[in-house]
Image (cartoon, rainbow, N blue to C red):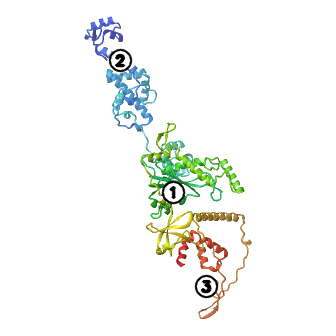
Amino acid sequence: MKTHYTCAELAEMKLSGLPSSKKGMIDFVSRGNWPSRKRDGRGGGFEYQPPKEVMDAIRGRVMHAAIKSAPVVKAETTAIVKTTVKTTELKDWQRDIAEARAAICTEVKRLAAIGGTERAIRSVIDMAAVGTLPEHLQQLVLVANAKAGNSRALSRTSIYRWLSDLDKGIGALAPKAVEKNTMPAWAGTLINLMANPQKPTLKACMQDIDKHLPAGVQAPSYWAADRFIKKMSKVDVQRGRMGSREIKNILPFVRRDTSGMWPTEAYTADGHTFDAEVAHRDHGRAFRPEITTVIDIATRKAVGWSADLAESTWSVLDALRYACTSCGIPSIFYVDNGSGFKNQTMSHEATGFMARLGITLTHSTPYNSQARGIIERSHQTIWVKGAKQLATYMGADMDAQAKQKVFKITRSDLKKTGTSKHLVPWDVFVSWCEELVTKYNNTPHSSLPRVSDPITGNKRHQTPNEAWDAAIAEGWKPTPVDAHESDDLFRPYKECKVARGEVRLYNNLYFSHDLTDYHGDTVRVGYDIHDASKVWVRNKAGQLICIAEFEANKRDYFPQSFIRQAAQKRAEGRIKRAEAKIEEAQAELDAPLLIEHQQVFDMPHMAINNPREQRLPSTPDVQIVENGVLGNVIEMPVTTRPMFDTQAGKYRWLNANPREITNEDEAWLDYYRLTAEWSDLFGDREVATR
């Protein structure tokens, strides 16, 4: 806007009541004696200052043109950022209204610079009423009003209020949402019906809700209950339907960052039942081995593994030995609470492996496999993926029909020839497992940093081996296990008592003259799980006393290794369980006899002079004087053998009744004296009485 105009400019505007030609406009301003001034610039001449009514018309013309050429801008770019209402808490419909109002206020402020705030507001209101605002502004009028229908009317009061609120931030322009916080009377009953581990459907709960509602409370409709449930937190809906373990799958969790760790700072390990059948290493039949894997947390490298019949202390020890000798001793060993990890062999303060290796053993929270996601994921990547390569795969992804077919084929082959071409031999399986681990360690891992591939030049993640080598290049060095210490470090130890130069370990006696002075003392006895010919005896301070050799005895002329004993015990347990199933099946085939069909047994005749007199079995007849009367006592028949609840009870009874021992009992006693139960209950007693 200018304050002075030439006659040509005024004529060109063609304002109402003014001449439309330059000559006519010169005559008009001369007659009206308008104030004038010389025009600067090329051509010279005069400029005239129009009166107030003409200036108002000019302002309206300029403002109308400015509105027509209004640019499309986002409200956030022009609004004053002075937040008093959090825009993050706004719903979509509130945000749309606030942005529409901010856009209109922005346009008013732009026009106010031309003709003032009041004139700008009037111009916007008038043009909105007749629908002549630019298209994008005209559409925002309907949204900004937030009224039912298609009202295009804007009020002066509303725009002034919006301008005031805009100074507080765009969030202040949003209308308030009215939320009903009152909970329906039936809500508690519905929540209780839904919160059951059987996970009933809403429809099922609605069918029973009438029986549980308090008196005077009307049951809601299905759709009212559905709207209420949808407004609840997803976690609250599942409370009671999920247990404390299952609900962790939908709760927030802590994602642990391992980027600042060095290799061997922490190892994690776990056992995994292989998802395919292979040939048993002893008898060749089908079975699923247990594989224990040790992973370095920092580099995700599989530093050790072991395959065995079951997850046990020895399989864990073998995997840890592999990891320590090949990659280094860790500072922390992070494992679960399984029996293979949580035992005295691992954690004993004097003889445990962790204390001797200087490793801190840390257990995860029970039933919290999420905390050990690294090792759980490695099972999927290495062993589950590998098992799918075998025909005997038995995982959940295997087709049920194909699984059944392979099962029948392998069992038929085993029955005919004792082997099956579909079962991988044990030695081949072990070599194949080593190949899987090597392949895993040389495959890019998504949790490791990105690097440029030296061959293709493309960006990819590091492999575990590359991450390990990168740490070494930065100056890190592992803590190795010396060759002369490796055997002793990984040798199990057990505390035993010395008796006359002997120590007893797993039913085997070991003797050395060097133990003479240690009679009655408790020592640490180390043994090789594969060789029972000798043991290493140390005092409480850990100093080696001697290497005691196996001493032949009446139970074991040749030494029996711990591994062999464990295998024998496992086999005996399986035999007993099979015999129990056979007896149960036989009992189902044999029809029970009625009382009248039972066989009649003749009981021997017994004559007793005095019922209060008791006789031991197998004692000669004696004469007893009672109350001055001499009488003969007839010998009682031998007491019949009782039913034994436990093996220990049977052993005590046979010890107390040696005349009742049969050939079968002799064989049973030879077996029982080899068991760990006999060693714990009666072994030390026999040594003491020898």
Quadrant including the N terminus: top left
For marks 2 and 3 on the same chain, the one whose residue lies earlier in the sequence: 2
Q: Which residue is mark 2?
A: 62
- Kindly indicate the quadrant of the structure image that contains residue 355: bottom left
Which numbered disc, 2 or 3, marks the residue closer to the eye?
Answer: 3
Q: Is residue 333 above or below residue 674?
A: above
Give the spatial CA distance, label 2 vs label 3: 133 Å
In terms of secondary structure, where does tag 2 sit?
Answer: helix
Looking at marks 2 and 1 on the same chain, the residue that comes earlier in the sequence is marked by 2
Amino acid identity at mark 1: Arg
Residue 383, numbered label: none
Residue picked out by circle 3: 614
For badge 2, the amino acid type reads: Val
* Residue pictured at 35% horizontal, 12% vertical: 13
Task: Tell me if mark 3 has few (under 14), some (14-19) or many (20+) residues whose alpha carbon lies within 10 angstroms of its own.
Answer: few
**Picture coordinates of residue 528 (x, y %)?**
54, 63
Q: Secondary structure at mark 3?
A: loop
Q: State left or right for residue 432 relative to residue 252.
A: right
Confirm or deny contact between disc 2 and disc 1 (CB under 8 A): no
Which quarter of the rendered picture does the C terminus lie within? Answer: bottom right
Q: Position of residue 623 (x, y in %)?
A: 63, 91
Vertical relation: 665 (above or below) 23: below
Residue 161 on image: x %, y %: 35, 30
Label 2 – label 1 distance at C-alpha:
89 Å
Query: What SS does tag 1 mark?
Result: helix
Q: Residues within 10 Å of mark 2 (few under 14, many from 20)?
A: some
- Residue at the extreme front: 484
Residue 245 in the image, given as x and y percentages of width and height: 50, 52
Q: Which residue is mark 1?
A: 321
Q: How many numbered tags mark residues here? A: 3
